[in-house]
Image (spheres, coloured by chain):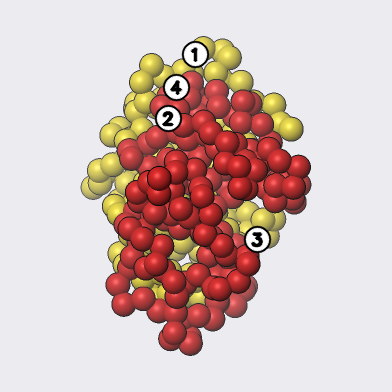
Chain colours: A yellow, B red
């Protein structure tokens, strides 16, 4: 049994109302997206709506759309991509859950000012960040903006 | 690197169009929902919209709503609940991703006729099943109906 994360107790990180507008996507880490695509596209029949390289994290991101949300395959591309370490430790599977907000400034209190939680250019031309030091119960949460940043 | 699941190659399990209507919820396995609730409710500010016991799998299910979809905490209650085994092996974290269909009969071809994939009475009065023998890349996929079954 784990202990709960502490921000709620401090009171400083609580939000009066939620800034989260939707469940944007679930990120699934895989070694090779080409091996995973046939299941989602051909067996489940989900539309493949995006396949792009995200330079900053050094990943290939493949998107399947389901009712306006997405299943996202995350394949490490660059040698120093930290998804490689995650895959070695965990094996393939769900890596993160991403919630969408109008503007990342609405979650400043949830995003610690540390180098582990930078805002980066994520897939689909969105700004995003991870809630790295508050991830509860083993669940890594990404936050992305609803609208394109460019 | 894993090998892909085989149903796509056989051709018999392919769907001409997708029956999946939305990303319904992400199930997060936890030992004690009471320890996890404060983060989702008070820190993220998500509305807690359900807290129920699901007798058949022997679990407590807690739902937070985000844009019409849900984050679902899954706490084992009964002694023989298989979530206990999963938690001992994996630790707390994302356990499954659930997609919604109009009717489970639309995915008969994806649901093998074996005792590991029964239709059961899931949370929020929905019928659901798991795609147990086709789960690709370590991702367990549940399928639920959009509408209440009672």
Name the residue tied to disc 1.
Answer: A12
**How far apart are the alpha carbons under marks 4 and 1?**
8 Å
Q: Residue at x 31, y 77 (%)?
A: B16
Give SS at disc 2.
strand
Query: Dot 4 surroundings within 10 Å: few (below 14), some, or many (20 or more)?
Result: some
Q: Position of residue A122 (x, y in %)?
A: 38, 49
Disc 3 and disc 4 in contact, CB within 8 angstroms: no
Q: Residue B49 — which label? A: 2
Q: Earlier in the sequence, mark 3 or mark 4?
A: 3
The residue carrying pointer 1 sits among few (fewer than 14), some (14 to 19) or many (20 or more) residues within 10 Å by Cα, namely: few
Residue extending furthest front? B150
Asked if marks 4 and 1 touch (Cβ < 8 Å), the reply is: yes
Q: Looking at the image, is mark 1 or mark 3 earlier in the sequence? A: 1
Q: Secondary structure at mark 1?
A: loop
| In front: label 2 or label 1 | 2
Select label 4 or label 2 by which is in front: 2
Query: Which label number is shown at residue B59?
Result: none
Both marks 4 and 2 on one chain:
no
Marking on residue A109 = 4
Which numbered marker is on residue A91?
Answer: 3
Q: CA distance from mark 2 to mark 3?
A: 33 Å
Tell me if residue A15 comes above or below residue A83 in the rendering: above
Residue at the outermost bottom position? B10
Is residue B143 something one can see in this rendering? yes
Residue at 48% x, 25% y is B41
- Which chain does the residue under circle 2 lie in? B
**A82 relative to A97 in the view: left or right:** right
């Amino acid at each position: 049994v784990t202990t709960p994360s502490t921000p709620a107790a401090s009171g400083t990180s609580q939000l009066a109302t939620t800034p989260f507008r939707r469940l944007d996507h679930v990120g699934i880490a895989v070694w090779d997206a080409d091996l995973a695509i046939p299941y989602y596209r051909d067996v489940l029949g989900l539309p493949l709506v995006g396949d792009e390289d995200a330079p900053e994290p050094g990943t290939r991101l493949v998107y399947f759309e389901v009712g306006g949300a997405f299943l996202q395959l995350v394949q490490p591309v660059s040698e120093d991509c930290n998804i490689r370490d995650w895959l070695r430790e965990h094996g393939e599977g769900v890596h993160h859950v991403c919630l969408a907000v109008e503007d990342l400034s609405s979650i400043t209190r949830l995003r610690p000012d540390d180098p582990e939680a930078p805002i980066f250019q994520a897939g689909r031309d969105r700004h995003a960040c991870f809630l790295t030091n508050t991830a509860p119960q083993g669940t890594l949460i990404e936050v992305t903006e609803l609208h394109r940043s460019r």
